[in-house]
Image (cartoon, rainbow, N blue to C red):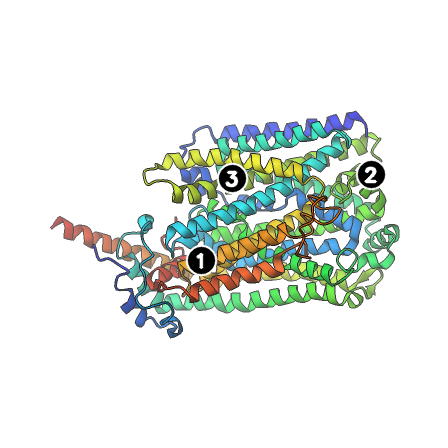
Amino acid sequence: MDKHEGRDAGTIRLDDPWYDALAVGWGEGAAADTAGPMAGDRPAPGASDIYLEVQRSAAFREVRSRYRRFVIPATAGFFFWYVAYVIAATAAPGLMARPVVGAVNVALLAGLGQFLTTFLLTWAYARHARLRRDRAALDLRWTVFEQERGRQRNGAREEGR
Amino acid sequence: MSTEHQALALVLFSVFIAITLGITTWVSRNRRGSAEEFYAGGRLFSPLENGFAIAGDYMSAASFLGISGLIALFGYDGMLYSVGFLVAWLVVLFLVAELVRNCGRFTLADVVAARMSQRPVRIAAGTSSVVVCVLYLVAQMVGAGSLVGLLIGGSGTAAKTLIVIGVGALMVVYVSFGGMRATTWIQIVKAVLLMGGAVTLTVLVLLRFHGDVNQLLTTAAGRSGHGARFLGPGLKYGADWTARFDFISLGLALVLGTAGLPHILSRFYTVPTARAARRSVVWAIALIGGFYLMTIVLGFGAAALLGPGEVRASNASGNTAVPLLAGFLGGGIDSTGGAVLFAFVAAIALATILAVVAGITLASSASVAHDLYASLKRRHGRQRSEVAVAKVAAVGIGAVAIALGLLAQDLNVAFLVGLAFAVAASANLPVLLYSLFWREFTTRGAVWSVYGGLVPAVLLVVLSPVVSGSADSLFPGADFQYFPLQNPGIVSIPLGFLAGWLGTLTSAEAPDAAKHAETEVRSLTGAGAV
């Protein structure tokens, strides 16, 4: 049970498929062990192995990529649209003040458009998460839970021997 | 302004206080006094309840009074606040709410410290959270001051001071006796009242114009004295390039700041799961979006029906436009209907301030006790003493906020909130996003990114025209203004991100792959979440 997780983090890191080799050489030589003095409220030893396994599993990679495939373009989209709106309001007040219908001008329509896109993206995100992520995430949560429990049970059995 | 409707407003406000104190007593009747209970209300609120509470925490007096006032005075430029305050929720919904719920326990620092060396990270994140909270509290106190000034009739400085102190004292009572559970119920009551008030006024404004928005806008533009320019951008922020950069800076701060506000982050811990956190944010977005749409109508309505002259005469920065509008809509401030409506709206606004103040005080006391005190004390504290420390911290933070609030009396509250958002976006958001999404992030990166955003943001505010160098400054006599913009966001937010990146690159510590795996798996699946 007492395995000192994190000591052998180097080996784990090497076969981690997401490890980006770029940052290996940063810093000088051996990594100072700054982590840990107050790590009292971390889960039992062994837990991190479970998390590493789950992180590499296909099911988790699927959940993560579904999340990212929605969130990254959506965030980029609304952020760009918002910044464009703010910059247009400052740099092109003439364009923004152009009347469209009666007293309603481009600026007012753009502002209301921001409200509309926010509502639409909120709806789309909630729907996407509910239909495409929630079930898989819950399954993974159970996987971790059962693995942790299994390991604790094994640990207890070894101690009892 | 007659004494009767001042009295009426105070009576209505007292009713609100009585109800909320009742709630506080009710929910604390058999509390166990654990940290879980005090900071997170037992984590058992439903998404609907928490959605209302988030909206209550977020829709501050600054929005209700400040934004409508800015629109009444400057037309379209005030609308940027409404848009920014709402769009910001997409950042929260997409990138923060669920992941923070899954990874943390009570505060922002919990999320970051899970991957890092606890002590330095907790001290950094705790410090920046407290700074953001104090700035935000000052804005609320200024709002309370100008409202009370309106109720009492301008010159009653002693009474004003007394009531601001009273508000401060009350919130300490709420927070220390009721903890998160009472604070949440107060937010819910307040959100319902505020939405009710806003809907009532909006309907009355639209009825005045027979539902014709076009006529409302035309009248507003006509009475403003600026003509069609009133409906386009540039009246407040279009004078020169300094003002325009100020506008962009503010826009960035608004959209990125919300996700770093400690009292908003702590709300996600009051629901049982990440899914519930998501659903509460969806509720909150619906409420907040509706509310900010209404503030736009109210702002233009105040411009059209009262005219900027009357608004400015009551409060130079427009903070009292909405209560005045309410009095007018009820049939004139001296009629019964006007007096009742005026009193109703003023009482709602005071209740709003009180509730938001309670929420922020709770969040900042959590940062002090759970992050700062827990990291700085010697290693023999007990769990129980942390809640006690939080209660003492609530008193201390309340005192600081009251003092600063009395000092900053004449600034527009929406603008002051903009400053708090800028600091939150510079100091809290970079570290939060890096630790959730960047696998190479290290302890040094975390500490640098907090201080690298916090120090420039605060320093630039101190050196800005807000504090010195112009007639409207906090210290009009002094002149140490070296930074031209009022809002530091455009400089300090990139600096926060840059500092985190540089700190990580220069760090000798290798990133911990196991802890990153744990954060990533927990954040997306909810495994091991409390």
Residue A54 at x, y percent in the picture: 33, 64
Residue B310 at x, y percent in the picture: 84, 42
Gap between marks 2 and 3 measured at Cα: 37 Å
**In the figure, is residue B516 to the left or right of A159?**
right
Residue B482 at x, y percent in the picture: 66, 55
Identify residue type, mark 1.
Ala
Element under disc 1: helix
Gap between marks 1 and 3 measured at Cα: 24 Å
The chain identifier of the residue carrying mark 2 reads: B
Residue A121: tell me if it is visible. Answer: yes
Disc number placed over residue B328 in the picture, else none: 2
Mark 1 near mark 3, Cβ–Cβ under 8 Å?
no
| Residue labelled with disc 1 | B446
Which mark is nearer the camera, 2 or 3? 3
Disc number placed over residue B362 in the picture, else none: 3
User: Picture quarter containing residue B197?
Assistant: top right
